[in-house]
Amino acid sequence: MIAPLGWWFAPITRDMSARFQSMDSYQIIKNIHVSCAGLSIAGFVLRSVWMLRGSPCVHHRLTRVVPHLIDATLLLSALGLLYLSTYRPNGSDWLTFKLMGVILYIAFGMVALRAGSTTGQRAIAVTAALIVFAYIVAVALTGQRWPFA
Ligand code: HEM
């Protein structure tokens, strides 16, 4: 009974292991990086909605801890990509602009979720952070400083 089942699943498992073998560590770290980028923005949107609605979920322990873990992994994977590649920010290339975008994203995120003193201020900061995040992703995907130009 087991053997036919094993035969049935063999092509799937064979295919998966082949896929993992062909992925080099750069690709694995890049996948982690991109996944964390997705989790980071999803978490930011969720926390912003909770914050603007005055939900108590904003103060939950998980809400305060998990985003830091995701963002730390995002930045660590970025360091891993830099280490394994020849990419270096040179002061005027796409990576420098992406880094400046990341700093702006963090700053707007802090105003949105912590420092903003009125709901209006926080809502503007949320919008600005989302626009900057879209810019960062566009720069990463195109390798252009001004991807929308
Ligand atoms: C909010 C923060 C960040 C977001 C949303 C983000 C997003 C992305 C995305 C979507 C990619 C994949 C691009 C592709 O598929 O070709 C990528 C790749 C990459 N990112 Fe980030 N990133 C962030 C932070 C950083 C930081 C801080 C650095 C380092 C200074 C960095 C360095 C890189 C590098 C070197 C690549 C690989 C580019 C390639 O192989 O073509 N990222 N990033």
Image (cartoon, grey):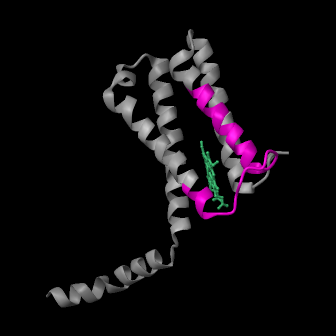
Q: Position of residue 73 (x, y in %)?
A: 47, 47
Residue, far left? 1
Residue, far right? 149
Q: Position of residue 90 (x, y in %)?
A: 78, 50
Q: Residue at x 70, y 44 (%)?
A: 98
Q: Residue at x 59, y 31 (%)?
A: 106
Q: Nearer the viewer, residue 123 or 31?
A: 31
Is the residue 137 above or below the residue 81 in the image? above
Image quadrant containing the C terminus: top right
Q: Position of residue 112 (x, y in %)?
A: 56, 22
Occupied quadrant, residue 59: top left
Q: Nearer the viewer, residue 94 or 128?
A: 94
Is the residue 147 above or below the residue 5 in the image? above
Occupied quadrant, residue 129: top right
Point out the stretch of residues depicted in magenta: 80-109
Judge whether residue 101 is colored magenta.
yes
Judge whether residue 112 is colored magenta.
no
Image quadrant containing the N terminus: bottom left
Horizontally, residue 115 falls left or right of residue 17, namely right
Q: Nearer the viewer, residue 1 or 129?
A: 129
Q: Residue at x 74, y 45 (%)?
A: 96
Instruction: Say how many tags the image has.
Output: 0
Is the residue 2 above or below the residue 128 in the image? below
Give the main secondary structure, helix, strand or loop, of the magenta stretch.
helix
Q: Position of residue 44 (x, y in %)?
A: 51, 33
